[in-house]
Amino acid sequence: EFIRSVYYNKLEFTRFSSSVGKFVGFTGYGVKNAEYWNNDPSKVSAMKAQKEGYCLHNIQIDYTAALTKS
């Protein structure tokens, strides 16, 4: 799962979760940002591309490393 959280003053106000597939807001300001970002298809597709570029690339490396150490 790919998660990108946005914090301000140690308080998480917005999060993108690949399992949900969109941004979720946790504060009033975060909800407004999440709505704005979810209405921008390029922002959502960029987050999905980051998942594919980072998670899917590294999962085999991490999986292999975990198996060889057990």
Image (cartoon, rainbow, N blue to C red):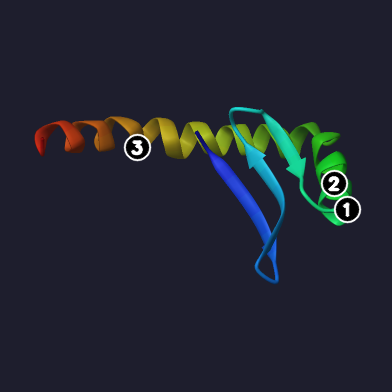
Q: Please, what secondary structure does the residue beneath circle 3 have?
A: helix
- The residue that disc 2 covers is 31
- The residue that disc 3 covers is 58
Q: Amino acid at mark 2?
A: Val
Q: Please, what secondary structure does the residue beneath circle 1 have?
A: helix
Q: Please, what secondary structure does the residue beneath circle 2 have?
A: helix
Residue shown at the point (67%, 56%) measured from the top left = 6
Q: Is residue 29 above or below residue 18?
A: below
Residue 32, percent from left and from top: 89, 48
Q: Amino acid at mark 3?
A: Asn
Asked if the residues shown at circle 1 and circle 2 are in contact, with their CB atoms under 8 angstroms apart, the answer is yes
Q: Distance between the Cα atoms at labels 3 and 1?
A: 35 Å
Q: Is residue 63 above or below residue 15?
A: above
Residue 16, percent from left and from top: 66, 41
In the image, 15: left or right of 50?
right
Q: Could you say which is closer to the camera, residue 6 or residue 47?
A: 6
- The residue that disc 1 covers is 28
Image quarter where the C terminus lies is top left
